[in-house]
Image: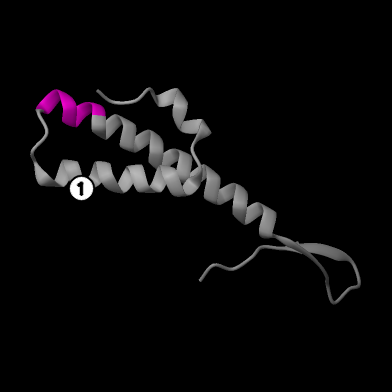
Amino acid sequence: MAKKPDDISTLSFENALAELESIVQKLESGQAALEDSIALYERGAALKAHCETTLKAAQEKIEKIVVGADGKPKTEAASFE
């Protein structure tokens, strides 16, 4: 039986990503019954959203304040490319 979606908010990024990877493997294998596949897909979607939110929050924390050419402070987003 799938875990409740509300427990996702307590997961670390790493744990949520590991569970999401496990769900993808199960779905790709085609071994899960239809109802189980639907529940897995729903949980996977919630885990994906949680991971995206966590990454966005981390990116915002990494933003740094720099002094522009005009001498005024401004924020500069961190580049992850």
Q: Is residue 64 above or below residue 12?
A: below
Q: Is residue 4 above or below residue 49?
A: above
Circle 1: element type: helix
SS assignment for the magenta stretch, majority: helix
Foreground pick, 1 / 5: 1
- Give the residue number, with chain letter if any, for mark 1: 25
Q: Residue at x 33, y 32 (%)?
A: 43
Foreground pick, 42 / 3: 3
Residue 60 among magenta residues? no
Residue 38 among magenta residues? yes
Amino acid type, callout 1 = Gln
Total marks shown come to: 1
Q: Where on the picture, by quarter, is residue 37?
A: top left
Q: Which residues are magenta?
A: 34-39
Q: How is the image coloured?
A: one colour
Q: Residue at x 39, y 48 (%)?
A: 17
User: Where residue 75 appears, x then y in whole percent?
Assistant: 76, 61
Query: As drawn, is 75 to the left or to the right of 62?
Result: right
Query: As drawn, is 52 to the left or to the right of 26?
Result: right
Q: Where on the picture, by quarter, is residue 45?
A: top left
